[in-house]
Image (tube, rainbow, N blue to C red):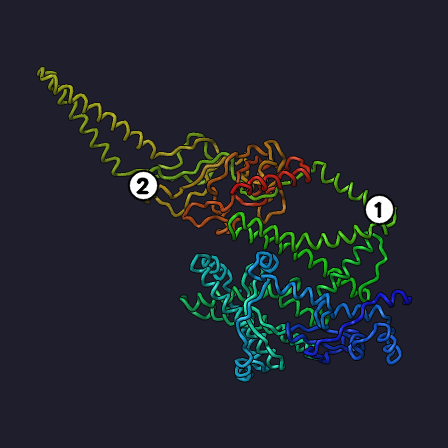
Amino acid sequence: MSQLAMTEVPMPQALRQDLRLYESAPGADGGPSWAIQDPASNRFFRIGWLEYECLLRWPGRPEAIAADIEAATPLAVDAEQVAEFARFLEVHQLALPSAETRQRIKKQAREPGWRHWRWWLHNYLFFRIPLLRPQRFLNRLTPLLAPLFTPAALFLFVAATLLGLVLVARQWEQFTHSVLDSLTLTGLLGFLLALVISKSLHELGHAVVATRFGVRVAHMGIAFLVLWPMLYTDTGESWRLRSHRQRLAISLAGITVELGLAALATLAWVLLDDGALRQAALYLATTGWLLSLTLNASPFMRFDGYFILSDLLDFPNLHERAGALARVWLRRQLLGLADPWPEELSQNNRRMLIAFAFMTWIYRLVVFLGIALMVYFLFFKALGIFLMLVELVWFIARPIWSEMSVWKKRWPEVRMRRQRLIHGVLAGVFLLLLLPWPYRVASHGYVHAERQQLVFAPFPAELVELRQAGAVGSGETLVVFTTPDLLARQTHVEASTAALTRRLAGLLELDGGMNKQLALTQQLDEQHAELRGLVEEAGRLAIHAEFAGQWRDPSVLLRPGTWLGVREAVGILIDPQSWVVDAYVEQRLVDRIAPGAQASFLPQNSLRALAGTVLEVDTVRSPRLPHTMLDSRHGGYFNTLPDGREATPSEALYRVRIRLHDVPDEIREMRGNVHIAGQPRSLLWEGVKGALATLIRESGF
């Protein structure tokens, strides 16, 4: 290092007297490591051999410290490395503050803090509220739980888990139906209570295992992630442990307790009879399995899965180090910059960490977008939009902008040839987004004969004759009913009509009064009208084929003399030569479909798709699903509202009717997947239209 550069290195400040230094486990490279504890914030900082040697000589001039370390140890050090360590100590407030830092601290102390809106803007995304200092309670509780940490307890836990899973697998349909039936207001409250119990025991598991290893649990409380409450346990002092296996055990404790509770609840659900206890076991089982395996076990957020993976690899600060490697990789690959790697690792380890960083970024992008939408819907519109924008800017736009700022600053370092290549790629991507692309709309539907006649009794009636299944001609009789009440009414009206006719004839012969003649004539007309109505009703009792086709599905249980209601289907007449598919498409996609478009239908459990053509597209949403096979409650594709018997879709669906070119292999109604050729659209224009439509829709308060 030149003399000029050495004089520019800032002078280190003295260390705070309350800091504590602990020897830690060797690093992944076998080198010694130590942990600095900051008692004020209860944070731990892991340092290596070089930083430890600096601390032994602190404070002093960076060049003097570097020279002394080189003289006394085999380490090669320069003053810039010492100065970098000094900046690290000052940033994390481990050194006594300089005059400038003291002024900044005084200024911060005079700020209103949580009483100011800026504090909430910066801290509503995540903050903690300590509630308990449980160390005395844990010291008394931990010895009582010692039997749970024996091999016998582990064996019983594994056996109970396997037994419960096997027994539930044999009753899987009943288990899933029980979960779906519990999705009511009372059921959701039960799930919420089970979640509180499960998470409380989860955090207690961390605390008990930490206490067994001699780690002090400073406090337990509630953390708020975007105002969503979560329990937490402060086990930060676990970095004092020299064994990463012990730290791994502390990280695993929460998930282990939660899975153990879920396993026992699963076994209890199988063994218990229907009642409150079995329902409680269902709540505990589902919340434990679902949240432990999908949320806590994920290494892409700073939950248990992240710390478990860090301890397994003995790789602290996994996200930060992997992210730093991925950013350097992007600069090398895209900009051609020769940036040095942040740390020396084997090529395989470096590739795995870079891949992990990209997976973490994608996972977090999805999660943060979901959180932004959740924030928007949880609050009234104005506040929801504001908080959603804060979420998007802070978690998504800010990191991207930070990296883009580095790229912009270092753009002159990029070779001209690569600059042209990047500009060409960007122009090509813009052109691809601008050009219209063919689009296939994927949906679901069911196939049925285009012409069909579903036969019911016109009103409650007695079956007289039922035609057997087979081919029928147009006009042939399918079913004949009778009803004694209708026959009795018809006989009564005929007799009344005859009597009135005779009385009227007698009055005419006697030349009776004109008023009586008019009254009897009116009564006779009424009887004739009623008789015609009864004859028409009697004619409805014989049902004839409206077209030539196949008479199918007459029930073998129906016999002459059986009484039927108006909701009981007797059979169906179909035209087997022409088949159509009724597909149901989401509102955002329906405008991409036009009559005449090509389509295909793949029946469920079939390998052969059937080609077809779109006949018509409904302009109004379907108020209900026409067939129960489409309802998710019966294994279908579409969720419906629990509002009684009507299968009302939970989202806006539009019917698209498709005529098939060929007859299906099986002459019956079937559900399946539908693909329709949509009109070509520009991806860029579609994005602009969607953004403008959303802006216009959400701008009304």
Question: Considering depth in this image, is 258 or 126 the residue closer to the camera?
Answer: 126
Is residue 5 shown left or right of residue 295?
right
Location of residue 348 (image quadrant)? bottom right
Q: Residue at x 64, y 65 (%)?
A: 302
Location of residue 290 (image quadrant)? bottom right
Q: Position of residue 442 (x, y in %)?
A: 61, 43
Picture layout, residue 78 above or below residue 294:
below
Specify the quadrant that holds the N terminus: bottom right
Is residue 563 shown left or right of residue 384?
left
Numbered mark located on residue 460 in the image: 2
Binning the other alpha carbons within 10 Å of mark 1 as few (below 14), some (14 to 19) or many (20 upward) gives: some
Q: Which amino acid, by three-letter code, is at mark 2? A: Pro
Q: Position of residue 635 (x, y in %)?
A: 51, 51
Q: Position of residue 91 (x, y in %)?
A: 72, 67
Q: Residue at x 78, y 43 (%)?
A: 426
Picture layout, residue 423 above or below residue 118:
above
Which comes before the other along the chain, label 1 or label 2? 1
Numbered mark located on residue 196 in the image: none
Question: Considering depth in this image, is 454 or 311 the residue closer to the camera?
Answer: 311
* Residue annotated with mark 1: 419
